[in-house]
Image: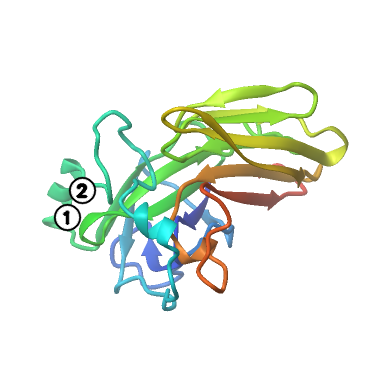
Amino acid sequence: MMIDVVAWGGDIGGLSFKAGKQEGKITAKAFTYSEPVKYSGPRIMEIHQSGDGRVGEDTGPISPEDREHQSMPLIIEHPGDGATGQASIPPALAKRREKEPTLVALVALPANARRTTVLLAPAAAGTYQGYVIDDDPSRLPLGKLRVHNLSPLTIAMQFTGGHKKEMKPRDTLLVDAPKGQAVYQLAYRTADSWKVQENNIIPVRPDEQTQFIVLKSNNQFFLSADGAAGGYLQTVILRRQTRSTP
């Protein structure tokens, strides 16, 4: 399996799939694909880290709106448990870290997939919480767009051609892109109403796997130079170009 490790937030360095591995350390870039890594091993993949993982300082002002929402979960692993803030350490990970302190995440990989994206978000005590996306070509064909709702809110996506869907947290949607474009409207549900956030166009190229991720994040990655956020929700587009089957 080929795996792309992507950081949910600032870049994360010093990662590896095996304890004590000194060569070829992995750096997860902030919401950006870098070099994929070949993996062969158990479906429950170990991620280890040497050092504190810092790649560069993440400094700068934070808008009042984003400061207010710092306690909102970045990745919802258990939507009904009412937890807020960083995820606690799963018991299985905590137990294994007693003997393997460099172990920072356990990630369950999909069966029979050839290509996978692993999003890593900071969690408690220097560990990471993983969200796995199965990018096997059978699930994400070239020239189509896959939408992921990784925000803590229910959203609604409407595309030209009449394709529309309400999406709860963690829902996904695969849509066509006529003439290489996906024209959409994004709205989110508050306690008493729906609010339209944006109307936009996403270029979808025929030789790329394209993913559109909707999330709620206070990370510096999404802030302008004056510390303002572009919208109540944030969006990310991940593109993987491929000339042949991965």
Q: In this view, does 132 lie to the left or right of 88?
A: right
Comparing 156 with 145, the one in front is 156
Q: In this view, does 128 lie above or below 211?
A: below
- The numbered mark, 2 or 1, whose residue comes first in the sequence reads 2
Q: Do the CB atoms of the residues marked 2 and 1 lie less than 8 Å apart?
A: yes
Tell me residue 104's x, y (percent): 27, 57
Q: Is residue 3 above or below residue 10?
A: above
Q: Please name the residue that numbered disc 1 is placed on.
A: 97
Q: Is residue 13 left or right of residue 212?
A: left
Classify mark 1: helix, strand or loop: helix
Image point (43%, 75%), residue name = 55
Image point (81%, 40%), residue name = 181
Residue 110 falls in image quadrant:
top left
Quarter of the rendering occupied by the C terminus? top right
Residue 1 shows in this picture: no
Q: Distance between the residues labelled 2 and 1?
A: 10 Å
Tell me residue 64's x, y (percent): 41, 61
Tell me residue 205's x, y (percent): 80, 45
Q: Please name the residue that numbered disc 2 is placed on.
A: 89
